[in-house]
Amino acid sequence: MGSHRMRTLRPWLLLAPTLALMAVLLAWPLGRVVWLSLQNYGLRELNRGTTNFVGFDNYVSVLTQPYLWTIVLPNTIGFAVVTVVGTVALGTLVALFLATLPVAWRYLASSAVMVAWAVPAITGTYVWVFLFDAADGLVTHALGGLGVIETGSVNWFLERWSFFGIAALNVVHHGFPFVAVTVLAGLLTVPTELYEAAVIDGAGAWRRFWSVTVPVLKPIFAVVTILSTIWDFKVFAQIFLMPGGSGTNREVFNLGVWSYIQSFAQGRYGLGAAIAVLLTLLLLGITVVYLRTLFVEEDL
Amino acid sequence: MSTTPAPVIAPVAPEESRDGAAPLRADRTSLRPWQVATLVALLGFALFPAYWMVSTALDPRASTRGGSLLPSGLTPRHFSFVLGDGGFGAFLLNSALVAVVTVLISSAVALLAAVAVARFRFPLRRQILVMILVAQMVPLEALVIPLFLQARTLHMLNSLLGLAVVYLAFSLPFAVWQLRGFVAAVPVEVEEAAYVDGCGWGQMFLRVLLPLVAPGLVATSVFSFITAWNEFIFALTFLQDDDKYTVAVGLQKFFGEHTADWGPIMAASTLITVPVVVFFLLVQRNLVSGLAAGAVKG
């Protein structure tokens, strides 16, 4: 065993398969997507195997379109902000509630809450589509029964705001259990003495939350917020599978869906690649913040 | 030093440490009225979509149930339709095949890498860890274009095996990151004891480390399985013949052909969802914990 040479070599031998696969499946495709984004690359180039470089034309075309600034970016960033705030707020409230429960109930309730997380995005999305279906949905029948609207008279998927309202409900419902169980796990590690001291100082529940819970759990809130942000920027199936989301309603595209439609529905791979690069850069920016948070709290 | 800070799973925290320090510790075992009310509201919100899916799948008059909360009866008809004419029997098998291949490769490869980053100090280690983290943020929309073009050139579109290999792009970095936490949680002394007993590195790995990391390996595998099972964008782009569809594409195509036929659509959704929920609840105890424990200490 352990000659010095072997000891320096072993970690690299162990890492080699992972690094090779990541090079082929991640690094190389990312390089290729940048390379594609600098070309007017369509079906003709694809079939002939030729290149067609146009410099930054695709980026100029994307960045100068009012469509990007008035529709796609608000649909991406606005949606992410709303869903992240919703997810973290609801998840935290649920965690605070679960922490008050007796142990057996807490275990039961957190398992049940986790079902919402476990339901796949694809099938969950179709359930929300059914619930809000214009003709057969529960919501239209319930509102019709209450006399708020005439049953079957409103199609919420046609209008941008209601479309994203439903999508936000779907995404928050799917995302809050992760925040809830993570914050709950953190809450259970906060030393009870801190709360006891706060009670002696006369702090109410609201005050205790902001001056004990939040500061102690700050790293946890940072991690769940940033992870939720990254996930909610990348939302694809939840938009694509809703009526109109796969191409017929341009009002509801976000960056990911727009990139996909340009590439695979329009055959404009170069333009689609440029949009994908912009999305990647946006996520990279958030990732840098994530890493800085992580390195502050942990010595890797 | 601490356990995994990043997503989802990490080594199990001992149960007593979780319950000992509850900030608003509940000494009673019964619920107060406001807790009952909140619990009902919470469970209603969390479980209602799943309930609506299953109850519609069983409802003989599914599409016209409208606002009625209970199904009008119970029938297996929609299930037999989607499994027969709908082709979901084959889709479920395809998804299982893809997910199993992805899990086997990514778990084996990732475990080796996890041992490297958790147990060895070597130059560039930190950079590799950062790279593995960053890799998890890459949007699939950016990978699908070049990988589709490449697979098309190599005539690997429409291949379930090709799809399983592509899934390594996102399951591998995730698995390395998770397993790293589990490996780090095994005390080094255990390894040293094996060396004292005359084991070589290989023997120590197989006889000592592997059995101790096994629970973490199972949890990580279950999660990789679920992500591969649920994956939509690559499956949609790569698979063209309906006998090759995985459940996600199968469901999307089925929805396109049977719009408003909610009984079968919800029956298919139920078949896709149930295995995932069962797996998920099985490993959920490993799920909570580590993240928070590690973060607070720091």
Image (cartoon, rainbow, N blue to C red):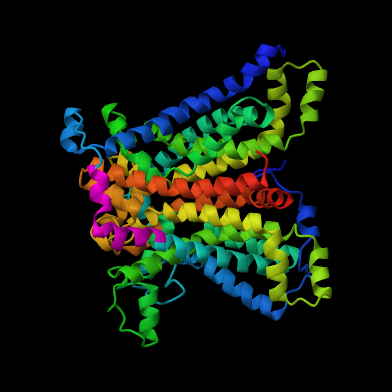
Residue A3 vs residue A105, the one in the foreground: A3
Indicate left or right for B26 with B65 as reference: right
Residue B144 vs residue B232, the one in the foreground: B144
Position above or below: B297 against B234: below
Viewport quadrant of the N terminus of chain B: top right
The residue range painted magenta reads A57-77
Magenta residue check for A72: yes
x then y, percent, for residue A232:
45, 56
State how many labels appear.
Answer: 0
x then y, percent, for residue A285:
46, 48
At horizontal 55% and vertical 57% (from top left) the residue drawn is: A225
Indicate left or right for B280 with B209 as reference: left
At horizontal 52% and vertical 28% (from top left) the residue drawn is: A18
Indicate left or right for B59 with B125 as reference: left
**What is the quadrant of residue A48 in the picture?**
top left
Position above or below: A193 against B219: below
**What is the quadrant of residue B89 in the picture?**
top left
